[in-house]
Amino acid sequence: MKTIIKNILVFSFVVVAIAAFFSLYQHAPLQKEEKVRIDTLVSSVVKEEVKSIEVRGDSLHIERNDGKKQVLHKEPQESLTELLRHYNVEPQKISKIAITVKDQGTAFWVNTLLTILLPFLLLGFLIFIMARQIQGANNRALTFGMSRARQIDQKTAKDRVTFKDVAGAVEAKEELQEIIEFLKDPKKFLSLGAKIPKGVLLVGAPGTGKTLLAKAVAGEAEAPFFSVSASEFIEMFVGVGASRVRDLFARAKKQSPCIIFIDEIDAIGRQRGAGLGGSHDEREQTLNQILVELDGFEPTTNVIVLAATNRPDVLDPALLRPGRFDRRVIIDLPRIEDRVAILEVHARNKPLAQDVSLRKVAERTPGFSGADLANLMNEAAILTARKNAKEISLDALFASIEKVMLGPERKSHIVSDKEKKITAYHEAGHALVSHTLPDAPPVQKISIISRGQAAGYTMNVPAEDRQFRTKSEFTAELAVLLGGYVSERLIFNEITTGASNDLKKATHLAKRLVTDYGMSEHLGQRTFGTREELIFLGREITEQRDYSEKTAERIDEEVTNFIKGAYATAQKVIAGSREKLEAIVQLLLEKETLEREEFEAIFASTTPEQASSAS
């Protein structure tokens, strides 16, 4: 509706402007003319002071003998001769004047016609716009069941992605290399009776590069790439999703060899019969059509379907059986060497200072995905630009790590001296326990500057990536979590709300040790409880007990025993290293932030003054 009104206003303005132009052109004098009355003209004619008169419609343009210009408007129906005769002007006087009648030409007729036809033109234009809108709606109705997949031709694409742009994920790239070779030379496989997988499922946590890998496969194979999100198939009308699936696969077959990439396939690939709507559910019909299309491929059709998800556990079994998505490529979170390579990729167009070591950055980012690392580099560039610096420093990268993990610094957040002191003892307790226990990760940084929702933080990351964790590492983590709580209670003989998040994490971890990992000595080697999920909601909503009330009481006792044991360990460490705790707090209150070298220098010093001078 807004577009129609806008078009009408524009059209009206153009028509009025044209009419005004012609009207101005018609009546515009070459020079300024004096307006006179009829009696003045008659008097001038009688005195023979008029040289010439030019008749232009209902206006008379008079030129006097002295060169003066005058203009007179008369009645349209009356001629000049009749006008002068009515005033008894002698014919001899009139004959001495050069009288010319000028044809008004095109301008007059255009001005007249536009004045008459303007309402009809506006009405016709309005009908034309409405007809176009109706025709557009009809066209959209005809194309409603067509696929909305975006096609990218890798041979002509300017931002073509290859495996060189994908750092890490070595095993995943090796698995996908077979797909590339099949797309380039299918006869090599078909001659041996081999059948390349029709569907490849990319599984990994969010941000690990599933979509990037799919683009890289298409870029390496130089094959057309159809990209679509699974949610784009679904509409409120029954049958539209299945129609779009059919159209997508028909388009792909015409562009063979090519790749179809379906992102977030769990949006339509969830287990059938688990939601609401029965057998006529639109999502299930779309899934059924995908299953049919995968089965309908001819052996010689060079179309590969790549799909990505971070929830493979909710996918329908029929989607994962051999002949459909029968190959699963796992994309793990990058390890330290992969993180270094990913940081190098995202640092290509960024000026780094000479002292920047990307490995040091990678050491502080365990658990970061590729997207997190890209965000980290971007935040460092923004921080550097904000400071009007020309190169990205290591400090900017470290600050970006903390911003990604915890949020920006809350420098405007005013904290009283008492709260600042409590925060310092709290974080010093975490750091002291983490440094003392051999199974706890080393401390990288301590700060009492507020970030996000945290009043302070202690960053302790493992020295190397770990795939498995031991019971002793878990118990050490529990003690570190309770270190701040113990420190506050020991120093102030009081408990604050600052440790609430630590207690929540410790309780959750202790419960998992008992119910998930079988690390309880009294309850034996088994798990407790099964999680029930509503597939159509895709989230955990309840936990089904598979144990008795008596066992539930014992689980609570074991969780409490883990917490008490960690509390005792933390209390023993802090009470036995009270001097070191005071040294850490004193230096924290002075500098607000301690790096790893400054923190470890405290344990190499005998007094806080020596620790401060060493730092």
Image (cartoon, rainbow, N blue to C red):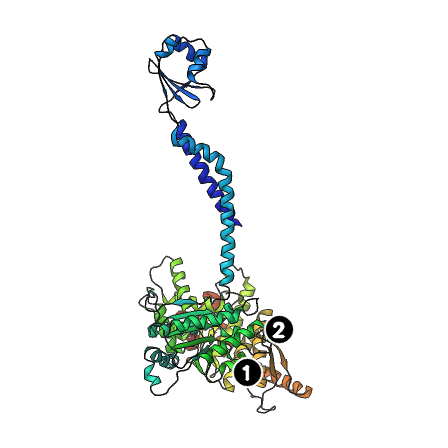
Q: Could you say whether the residue bearing mark 2 is in a helix, strand or loop?
A: loop
Q: Identify whether 41 is placed above or below 188.
A: above
Q: Is residue 222 above or below residue 388?
A: below
Describe the element under mark 1 as helix, strand or loop. helix
Image-based side of 302 in relation to 510, left or right: left
Q: Position of residue 502 (x, y in %)?
A: 56, 74
* Label ID, residue 569: 1
Residue located 42% across and 17% down the image: 80
Q: Quadrant of residue 533?
A: bottom right
Q: CA distance from mark 2 to mark 1?
A: 55 Å
190 or 484, which lies in front? 190
Residue 281 location (% of width, % of height): 59, 73
Mark 2 sits on what residue? 277
Please identify the quarter of the rendering in which residue 332 is found: bottom left
Horizontal side of 554 relative to 97 (left or right) equals right
Q: Please state which amino acid type lies under the numbered disc 1.
A: Thr
Please determine whether, in this image, residue 175 is positioned above or below residue 141.
Answer: below
Q: Residues within 10 Å of mark 1 (few under 14, many from 20)?
A: many
Please tell me which of labels 2 and 1 falls first in the chain.
Answer: 2
Of residue 17 and residue 539, the one placed in the foreground of this image is 17
